[in-house]
């Protein structure tokens, strides 16, 4: 199975390395020092699940040189969706599936007009990992899960084949017949937790049990649920409880990628996280004061700069 990974950071690098180790023909699309390191010493993933070192690593900055692939793991930052979508067009054949694994809830919608209805699936990645040096990914904790599925809910042959490969790779994988619900379940968690960790400059373990912080987490979760229900998303009645349970059991040292980006002075995804909650709240007449505060407080750093 031929797989291309665009965006070889914590998500793309972590899952891509696991799939390559399982025997898939994986090529990483990257740039700069990270690309140079992968082409030289290979890609190294340090993880409590066990370290992986891909030598040699297939890596390039030119998708046109790869040819058509079976799957694309689409893992770029949210501000790069459209440009990266155009960039990977040479990879797309009639049966190719593109699985967006970003944060947020609209990457698939933004890719459809670029790549076409047949190419785009939905996906959710659950892993805490980041680039810690060129050519090196470090994972925090052991949880590593991918949920994916066709946008129309059918169990396609290509999705079944990819599920079998993921299972061989040894991480938790689910082929969902309700991928939009899964996307929103992650969005409830991520939009809220990422904003809170970024504002507090602290990992989840320092925040979740604080009696002053906990009500803010809960208010943020409830706002996203209310917006999702207003949009017509089929969310479970216990959505907030499920998200709270996940937060309670997350590795104490875990930091959301947006919190790490703030620390490093990088651009932030807040317009597509809390900013998106606020936008949809206005559209559907749902108050979102917690996310409005998060968005407003982080907006000065959205383009990058010292946090």
Image (tube, helix red, strand yellow):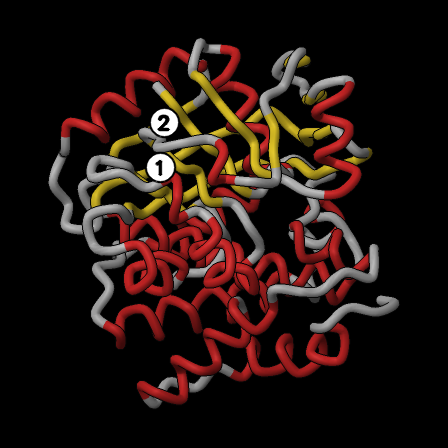
Image point 11% across, 40% down: which residue?
154
Pinpoint residue 18: horizontal percent, then vertical percent.
52, 19
**Quarter of the image with the C terminus in it:** bottom right
Q: Inspect this view and state whether residue 178 appears.
A: yes
Seen from this angle, which residue lies furthest left? Answer: 154
Picture layout, residue 125 above or below residue 201: above
* Residue behind mark 1: 147
Q: Inspect this view and state whether residue 52 appears.
A: no
Task: Compare residues 131 and 287 and report the one nearer the observer.
Answer: 131
Query: What element does badge 1 sit on?
Result: strand
Q: Residues within 10 Å of mark 2 (few under 14, many from 20)?
A: many
* Residue behind mark 2: 173
Question: Marks 1 and 2, how far apart in space?
Answer: 6 Å
Picture layout, residue 30 above or below residue 231: above
Picture layout, residue 208 above or below residue 245: below
Q: Residues within 10 Å of mark 1 (few under 14, many from 20)?
A: many
Q: Mark 1 and mark 2 in contact? Answer it, CB < 8 Å.
A: yes
Pinpoint residue 78: horizontal percent, then vertical percent.
53, 60
Query: What element does badge 2 sit on?
Result: strand
The image quadrant of residue 86 is bottom left
**Quarter of the image with the N terminus in it:** top left
Seen from this angle, which residue lies furthest right? Answer: 306
Task: Compare residues 241 and 119 and report the one nearer the observer.
Answer: 119
> Does residue 28 appear to the left or right of 175 in the view shown?
right
Q: In the image, which disc is placed on residue 189?
A: none
Picture layout, residue 82 above or below residue 143: below
Q: Mark 2 or mark 1, which is nearer the start of the sequence?
A: 1
Image point 48% across, 23% down: which residue?
26
């Amino acid at each position: 199975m031929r797989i291309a990974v665009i965006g070889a950071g914590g998500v793309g690098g972590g899952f891509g390395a696991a799939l390559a180790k399982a025997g898939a023909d994986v090529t990483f699309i990257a740039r700069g020092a990270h690309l140079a390191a992968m082409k030289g010493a290979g890609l190294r993933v340090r993880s409590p699940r066990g370290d992986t070192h891909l030598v040699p690593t297939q890596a390039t900055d030119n998708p046109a040189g790869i040819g058509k692939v079976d799957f694309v793991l689409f893992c770029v930052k949210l501000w790069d969706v459209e440009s990266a979508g155009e960039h990977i067009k040479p990879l797309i054949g009639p049966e190719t599936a593109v699985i967006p694994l970003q944060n947020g809830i609209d990457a698939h919608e933004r890719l459809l007009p670029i790549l076409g209805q047949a190419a785009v699936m939905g996906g959710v990645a659950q892993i805490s990992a980041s680039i810690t040096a060129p050519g090196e990914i470090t994972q925090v904790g052991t949880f590593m899960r991918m949920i994916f599925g066709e946008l129309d809910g059918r169990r396609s042959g290509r999705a079944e084949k990819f599920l079998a490969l993921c299972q061989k790779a040894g991480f938790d994988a689910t082929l969902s017949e309700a991928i939009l619900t899964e996307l929103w379940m992650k969005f409830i968690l991520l939009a809220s937790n990422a904003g809170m960790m970024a504002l507090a400059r602290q990992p989840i373990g320092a925040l979740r049990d604080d009696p002053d912080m906990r009500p803010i987490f809960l208010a943020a979760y409830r706002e996203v649920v209310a917006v999702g229900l207003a949009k017509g998303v089929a969310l479970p009645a216990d959505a907030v409880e499920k998200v709270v349970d996940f937060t309670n059991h997350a590795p104490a040292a875990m930091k959301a990628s947006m919190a790490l980006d703030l620390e490093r002075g990088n651009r932030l995804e807040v317009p597509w996280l809390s900013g998106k909650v606020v936008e949809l709240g206005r559209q559907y007449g749902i108050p979102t004061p917690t996310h409005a505060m998060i968005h407003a407080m982080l907006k000065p750093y959205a383009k990058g700069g010292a946090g």
